[in-house]
């Protein structure tokens, strides 16, 4: 397999995480970084670029885009048109209209494009997906998600809360992961039945809480509370089926503040009308390692080398998730 030469546009938190995955890979090398602020790279041999144009004109194979959402679609299109494969962080764009332009550029370029919906590569999520696809639990009835964080003492100053840079608030920043998992587990598209977005605590332009009711084209109802006022980091996704349920509670992150990461599987077959109603047999699995970032990069590299194709984080995924988010923002009350 060829050693692929990478560039990174945007060297914030996500840029540094992606940098480490490149260093960890035997099939990738980091050549250059473009970042508008002063920084020091771990590898002193990595070239510093003064513009995105300088980066895409280098002799590199692929670019990871981890910059402001406001320039994401522009950077993706320019990189594709320059003959580079592209991995772009979420959110993929400011709105769905921008993704249509991206898809046109993707088709014209013939290059690989992948978006960073990282949660699909967590062990608990992958195991839940296998269980659901096996159909052992029967038909999925409903889903209930909570994704919240404490914010921070300087949360109101974070670039993500300025619409001209981010496009939206906590829903677009964090809730988008849960929306993607709704789609991933159901293989369905959702419509927004009701959405209430509010800035309940932080003095910011964007929402710090989002309350949603959604329905899939298979009539699966899903609710989501995405919050920047949870005060304790929390990830919880509950799914009820005909024959039982799956609860994903906690998710591993670099801060480990959403841990532990667990999957609880409950089965209805041990119900007893006298003593055991509401007490089904449960098994809980704990996950201690997070290889999701490396798995994401591997899927991207394998697609470039034609070993496989991008299955997670396609441009279609980006388009559908942004169409849903557009409708949520447009129908908010």
Image (cartoon, rainbow, N blue to C red):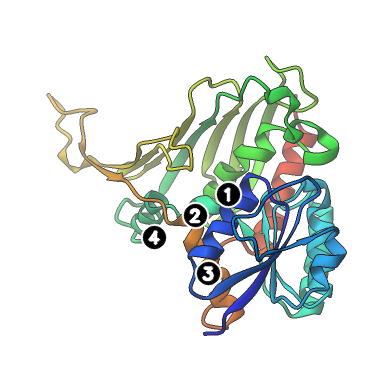
Task: Tell which circle, 3 or 1, labels the residue nearer the N-terminal end.
Answer: 1
Q: Is residue 22 left or right of residue 326?
A: left
Q: Which residue is mark 3?
A: 299
- Residue 120 is labelled as 2
Q: Nearer the viewer, mark 3 or mark 4?
A: 3
Q: Is disc 2 in contact with disc 1, using a CB cutoff of under 8 Å?
A: yes
Q: Which residue is mark 1?
A: 180
For label 2, count other residues whose C-alpha is less than 10 Å away and answer few (under 14), some (14-19) or many (20+). Answer: many
Task: Tell which circle, 3 or 2, labels the residue nearer the N-terminal end.
Answer: 2
Say which of 332 and 59 sits in front: 59
Give me the C-alpha separation between circle 3 and circle 4. Answer: 21 Å
- Asked if residue 300 is positioned above or below residue 241 in the image, the reply reads below
Identify the residue shown where x is 50% and y is 50%: 119
x and y percentages locating residue 157 in the rendered image: 75, 26
Task: Tell which circle, 2 or 1, labels the residue nearer the N-terminal end.
Answer: 2
x and y percentages locating residue 224 in the rendered image: 56, 33
For label 1, count other residues whose C-alpha is less than 10 Å away and answer few (under 14), some (14-19) or many (20+). Answer: many
Q: Is disc 3 in contact with disc 4, using a CB cutoff of under 8 Å?
A: no
Residue 310 in view (yes/no) = no
Task: Tell which circle, 1 or 4, labels the residue nearer the N-terminal end.
Answer: 4
Q: Which residue is mark 4?
A: 133
Q: Is disc 3 in contact with disc 2, using a CB cutoff of under 8 Å?
A: no
**Secondary element at tag 4:** helix
Give me the C-alpha separation between circle 4 and circle 2. Answer: 14 Å
Give me the C-alpha separation between circle 1 and circle 4. Answer: 17 Å
Task: Tell which circle, 4 or 2, labels the residue nearer the N-terminal end.
Answer: 2
For label 4, count other residues whose C-alpha is less than 10 Å away and answer few (under 14), some (14-19) or many (20+). Answer: few
**Secondary element at tag 1:** helix
Identify the residue shown where x is 37% and y is 49%: 124
């Amino acid at each position: 397999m060829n050693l692929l030469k990478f560039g990174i546009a945007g060297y914030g938190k996500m840029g540094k995480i992606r940098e480490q995955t490149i260093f960890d890979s035997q099939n990738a090398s980091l050549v250059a970084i473009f970042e508008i602020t002063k920084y020091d790279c771990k590898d002193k041999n990595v070239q510093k670029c003064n513009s995105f144009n300088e980066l895409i004109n280098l002799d590199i194979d692929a670019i990871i885009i981890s910059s402001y959402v406001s320039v994401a679609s522009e950077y993706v299109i320019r990189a594709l048109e320059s003959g580079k494969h592209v991995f772009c962080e979420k959110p993929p764009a400011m709105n769905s209209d921008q993704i249509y332009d991206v898809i046109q550029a993707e088709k014209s370029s013939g290059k690989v494009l992948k978006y960073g919906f990282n949660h699909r590569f967590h062990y608990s999520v992958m195991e839940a997906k296998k269980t659901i696809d096996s159909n052992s639990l029967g038909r999925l009835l409903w889903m209930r998600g909570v994704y919240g964080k404490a914010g921070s003492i300087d949360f109101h100053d974070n670039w993500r809360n300025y619409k001209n840079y981010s496009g939206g608030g906590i829903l677009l920043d964090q809730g988008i992961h849960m929306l993607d998992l709704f789609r991933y587990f159901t293989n369905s598209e959702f419509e927004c039945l009701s959405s209430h977005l509010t800035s309940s605590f932080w003095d910011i332009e964007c929402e710090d809480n989002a309350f949603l009711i959604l329905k899939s084209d298979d009539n699966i109802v899903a609710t989501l509370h995405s919050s920047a006022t949870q005060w304790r980091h929390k990830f919880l996704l509950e799914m009820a089926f005909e024959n039982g349920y799956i609860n994903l509670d906690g998710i591993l992150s670099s801060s480990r503040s959403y841990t532990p990461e667990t999957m609880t599987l409950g089965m209805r077959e041990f119900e007893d009308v006298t003593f055991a109603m509401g007490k089904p047999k449960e098994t809980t699995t704990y996950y201690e390692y997070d290889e999701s970032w490396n798995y994401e990069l591997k899927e991207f590299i394998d697609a470039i080398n034609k070993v496989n194709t991008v299955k997670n984080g396609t441009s279609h995924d980006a388009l559908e998730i942004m169409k849903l988010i557009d409708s949520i923002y447009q129908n908010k009350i």
